[in-house]
Structures are given as C-alpha cells and as structure tokens.
Amino acid sequence: MPDHPSSQSSSHSVTVERQRLRFAAGHFATFADELEPIHGHNYDVFVEVIGPLTEESWVIDFSLLKRLTREVCETLDHKFLLQMDSRSLTITDDDTHYIVQYRDELPYRLPKHDVAALPIDNSTAERLSQYIAGRLVDSLGTSGPSGLARLRVGVEEMPGQAAWFETDL
C-alpha cells in the first residue's frame, strides 16, 4: 500500500452520527392542503465528509466534525422549528412572539425564545438536513481542512425514517 496515493480521483470519507449529534424539537409540516398537528421528534443527525487525506492521513479530525455538528444541533434542541419561508403559513413577528396562521384556522402564538426560526419552506426532514448541511458548509469553510470535496447530512426523525442532503464543498 503506497504511503501517499497520488490519484486525484480517489477519496476517503468519514462519518459521525448519533451519540450527542441529536436534538429534540417540535414542529408541524404542511403537505398539500393540510397542516400537521404540532408534534415532536428526537432527531438523530448523520454527517459524512468526503475528501483527500491530509498530511496526517485523515480527511478531517473526528472531534472537529462532531463539535461543529453538535453546535448546530444545540441551536435546534428543545425548540419549535418554524419554517420562516413557508408558502402556506402567514408568520408575523410582534417582537416577543411569532404568530403563525394557517388559512382560517386559529393562529398559534409562539414565544420567540422557544422558536428556531429557520430559513426553510417546510420543517420536513429533507429541509432540516439541507439546513444543517448549509450551516456545516459555512463552519467547514472556516475551520475545516482544505480540499474537502463533499458533504452528506442525514436527519432521522424516527428509527428507519431519515432524509439526506448532499452538496459539494
């Protein structure tokens, strides 16, 4: 086995998952002509980073990747996940609360300190994985090693039910 593979097309990957890479949060999603009732999940997060080996023969330090992912999870933990770019909800900010209206139903009044106001159109696992990936792209750009190629993030909202988002770095 060569000490330093020279092929540009080869890469390695590392993953971190679960353990402390999780968060508990409430949400409701909108589907077709329906607003789900408020409910919650214990979300588990999976992260895969693909890239070349560094001089130390690793893609990225596991502890750095876990820390960056945990920081994102902590901003979502024990919050209501509010899709601020929703096409189905009318959201008003009165400085202390978000008032959320779906059609002619009674509005929800959510204390802002209990809300993670997210720049997504729906609080699905697909959009949550994309949001977390976006935050990690920013963090890895400033803290990660150079040359990382791809990032894949999964959000599992219950065992056996996960959504994934993948992007170039």
Image (cartoon, grey):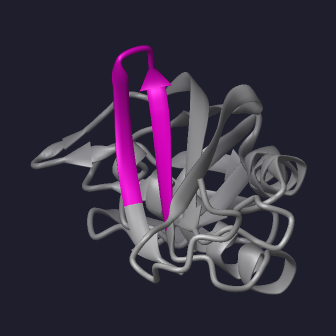
**Residue visible at 43% across and 14% down in the picture:** 159
Quarter of the image where one finds residue 140: bottom right
* Residue in front for this viewpoint, 162 or 76: 162
108 with respect to 122 (left or right): right
Relative vertical location of residue 125 with respect to residue 165 in this rendering, above or below: above
Range of residues picked out in magenta: 151-165
Horizontal side of 116 relative to 62 (left or right) equals left
In the rendering, at what x and y percent does residue 124 appear? 37, 46
- Residue 37 sits inside the magenta stretch: no
Taking depth in this image into account, of 52 and 84 the one nearest to the observer is 52
Taking the image as shown, residue 75 lies to the left or right of residue 51, namely right
Q: Residue at x 42, y 39 (%)?
A: 28
**Near-viewer residue (85 or 139):** 139
Outermost residue on the front side: it is 1
> What residue is rendered at 11% in x and 47% in y?
33
**Position in image of residue 1 (x %, y %):** 59, 53
Residue lying at the far top in this picture: please name it: 159
Queried whether the magenta region covers residue 163, the answer comes back as: yes
Residue plotted at (84% across, 56% down): 61
Q: Main secondary structure of the magenta part?
A: strand
Residue 34 locus on image (x, y percent): 18, 41
Locate residue 15, reporting x and y percent. 61, 43
Quarter-wise, where is residue 40 in the image?
A: top right
